Amino acid sequence: MKSVEIPTSTQPAVYKSNLKPIWCPGCGDYGVLSALCKALANIGRPPHEIAFVSGIGCSSRIPGYTTAYGFNSVHGRALPIAQGIKIANPDLLVIAAGGDGDGFSIGGGHLPHAIRRNLDITYIVMDNQVYGLTKGQLSPTSPCGAKTVTSVYGSMEAPVNPLATVLGYGCGFVAQGTPADLPGLIALIEEAIRYPGFAFVNVQSPCVTFGSPDWQLPQHKKTLKKLIELGHDPANRLAAFDLAQQYGEELHVGVLYRNPNPPVTYDQLVRQRQAELAGNTVQKDRILEMFKVA
Ligand SMILES: Cc1ncc(C[n+]2csc(CCOP(=O)(O)OP(=O)(O)O)c2C)c(N)n1
Ligand code: SF4
């Protein structure tokens, strides 16, 4: 459970702001917002104990549609800001969210460091294989051959594999979902938030306007494979890697990997160090001296 345990259930509507989403009708992000509010209701932390950070993109509008503290920040910078918030106030439940462009292109350099630092943060990527907000350019997860406004003859680049990437970086919780399986997505987001450490959820959230017409919610419904029904053991990291290799070919939904022995988080270490420091007046004075303004 993230930081402070208050497992009393409340209503999803408590987390929805009065702002009406301006996403295109049918956009997958509506389902993500709905799943998120339901997951938060199951967890029961009040909105003022939650901070929601995003970058820039259609998907990154999501904090504005919730009643939690929201920061719709700068393209690609959700993770550094989320980490700063968590370190400054470890009692906040911190969720970062955004698109595949935001997370794996411009923000891609932050991902390995956020994962290895292992703050108790949940990161939700709405992976629609395209830049939605800027009108349909190639994104890092666009498949080979994808025709977009910036790849009119079809993409010649191999896509990023988000699942294998975060597993390789050592992420302790890795899951994939789709709004085509809303109950499954709610459960995944809830489990990710409850995981004590950096948790990653890749949501296949189709762009109805610029995304592939062959990869929308009806296709997800037909092709998705639930990992639980395949008998996958989420404690088995090598099996998770095998499944992750099939990103872009199979739509696996569920928890690929959950570290059965989560290591101590960075925010816990900071708190420990602060407590130690409080009892060590010599060291404390030396540090205060270092930061003294002349
Ligand atoms: C520094 C910077 N570079 C580029 C942009 C333009 N820009 C805004 S959103 C975006 C990509 C959006 O795609 P994605 O992150 O996948 O989110 P989506 O809109 O698909 O949800 C780009 C390139 C920007 N706002 N800031
Ligand atoms: S452009 Fe695509 S990602 Fe953006 S709101 Fe419309 S459907 Fe959603």
Image (spheres, grey):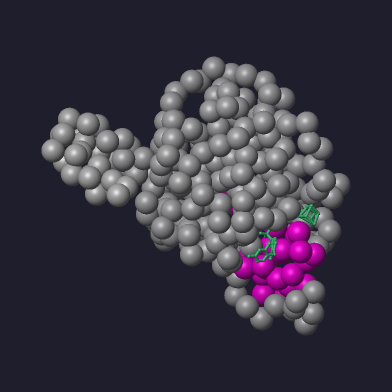
Above or below: residue 159 compared with residue 123: below
Residue found at the far front of this picture: 294
Principal secondary structure, stretch drawn in magenta? loop
Q: Is residue 271 left or right of residue 150?
A: left
Magenta segment boundaries in residue numbering: 124-148
Above or below: residue 52 compared with residue 5: below
Q: Is residue 239 left or right of residue 184?
A: left
Residue in front for this viewpoint, 199 or 248: 199
| Residue drawn at the location 41% of the way across and 58% of the way down | 113
Q: Position of residue 196 (x, y in %)?
A: 41, 37
Tell me if residue 279 can be seen: yes
| Residue 125 in magenta stretch | yes
Quarter of the picture for ligand 2?
bottom right
Quadrant location of the N terminus?
Answer: top left
Tell me if residue 203 can be seen: no
Q: Position of residue 17 (x, y in %)?
A: 73, 31
Above or below: residue 31 compared with residue 144: above
Q: Position of residue 279 (x, y in %)?
A: 17, 30
Above or below: residue 218 compared with residue 100: above
Q: Position of residue 4 (x, y in %)?
A: 43, 26
| Residue drawn at the location 65% of the way across and 47% of the way down | 72
